[in-house]
Image (cartoon, rainbow, N blue to C red):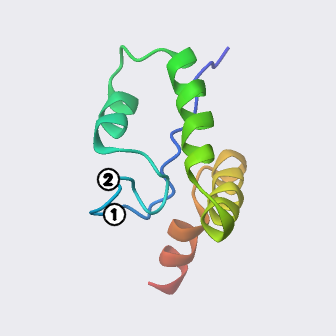
Amino acid sequence: MNDRIVSPCISICKTDPITGYCYGCARTNDEKKLWKNENTNNDWKKQNLEEITQRMTGWQQDTFKESYKHKLKNGISLFKKNLLETE
C-alpha cells in the first residue's frame, strides 16, 4: 500500500521576495525542505497542502489546482509537461 503524498511542487520554482512564498506552490523554503525530509509525516503534509491552497487566490489557486491534479493523475505537472513538449 502506497501512502505517499505527492509533493505540491508544480515546477514553477520562484520565490516571491516579499511574501517568501513560491509562485507555483505557495510554500516557504522551509516547507519545501520539510517535504523532502524522509521523517516528515503524512499528517503534516496533508495539513501543509491545506495551508498552501489557502494562501493562494484567483488564478494562482486555479492554476495550482489544475496542475497538481494533472500531476497526481499523470506523474508530471502541466508546466513541466508543456516544457518538455517544446524541447
Q: What residue type is labelled 2?
A: Gly
- Residue extending farthest to the front is 18
* Residue plotted at (40% across, 56% down): 22
Residue 46, placed above or below residue 1: below
Q: Position of residue 47 (x, y in %)?
A: 58, 25
Residue in the foreground of this view, choosing between 19 and 73: 19
Question: What residue is shown with label 2?
Answer: 20
Q: Where is residue 16 in the image (x, y as percent from the top left)?
A: 34, 63
Q: What element carries label 2?
A: loop
Residue 55, placed above or below residue 59: above
Q: Quadrant of residue 85?
A: bottom right
Residue 28 image label: none
**Quarter placement of the N terminus:** top right
Residue 83, placed above or below residue 38: below
Q: In which quarter of the image is residue 30?
A: top left
- Residue extending farthest to the bottom is 86
* Residue plotted at (49% across, 77% down): 83
Q: Is residue 14 left or right of residue 73?
A: left
Q: Where is residue 23 in the image (x, y as percent from the top left)?
A: 44, 63
Q: Which amino acid does label 1 sit on?
A: Asp
Mark 1 vs 2: CB contact within 8 A: yes
Q: Position of residue 38 (x, y in %)?
A: 36, 19
Total numbered badges shown on the rendered structure: 2
Q: Quadrant of residue 49?
A: top right
Q: How crowded is mark 1: few (under 14 residues within 10 Å), some or many (20 or more)?
A: few
Question: What residue is shown with label 1?
Answer: 16
**Quarter placement of the C terminus:** bottom left
* Residue plotted at (62% across, 45% down): 54
Residue in the foreground of this view, choosing between 85 and 40: 40
Q: In this view, does 75 lie to the left or right of 73?
A: left
Gap between marks 1 and 2 measured at Cα: 5 Å
